[in-house]
Image (cartoon, rainbow, N blue to C red):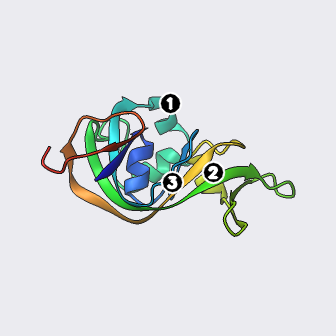
Amino acid sequence: MKAITIWQPWATLAALEEKGNETRGWATKYRGPIAIHAAKYIDGEACEREPIKSTLAKHGYTADNLPTGAIVGFANLEECWSIGEDYQSGMPILYNGEGGRTKLVNSTEAEFGWYAPDRFAWEFADVKQLPEPIPAKGQQGLWNWEVSQ
């Protein structure tokens, strides 16, 4: 199964379905099932910023109890959007060259990613958080996770 390693708190926000897109500096053509892997790194400052802090608290998390070095959920990678800026609202806009589709990013989602122009938003759907994280060693990029790990 394909997997993506994400720093905390963003991996948990994705697994909780609070964060619908994972922003990256590179695009992917892959679509399909993906494991959400929480890196060993926790950005403690981000955990203290709103709306991240209150969103984590709503689910019983703080920087002190976020899982690390583990698969925390599964999703379906639906789309890889290019990121631009809506000149009227100043908010990020997602666009897809295939069919010319566009989609505005809401203000909360914008706080949960790096939505700079010329980056990419990987859209997750059908997200399922695991009741217990599965320890796994992460990797950079999109990688193959063997379920038997």
Q: Residue 145: x, y in percent?
A: 25, 46
The amino acid sitting under disc 1 is Glu
Q: Residue 45: x, y in percent?
A: 50, 30
Q: Residue at x 29, y 45 (%)?
A: 144
Left or right of 66 in this view: 21: right
Would you name the residue on which mark 2 appears? 110
Do tag 3 and tag 2 residues touch (Cβ < 8 Å)?
A: no
Which mark is first along the chain, 1 or 2?
1
Q: Is residue 111 above or below residue 7?
A: below
Nearer the observer: mark 3 or 2; the answer is 3
Residue 25, quarter of picture: top right
SS under mark 1: helix
Q: Residue at x 29, y 50 (%)?
A: 72
Q: Which mark is residue 29?
A: 3
Q: Which mark is residue 45?
A: 1
Which mark is first along the chain, 3 or 1?
3
SS under mark 2: helix
Nearer the observer: mark 1 or 3; the answer is 3
The amino acid sitting under disc 2 is Ala
Left or right of 130 in this view: 17: right
Q: CA distance from mark 1 to mark 3?
A: 32 Å
Residue 94, quarter of picture: bottom right
SS under mark 3: loop
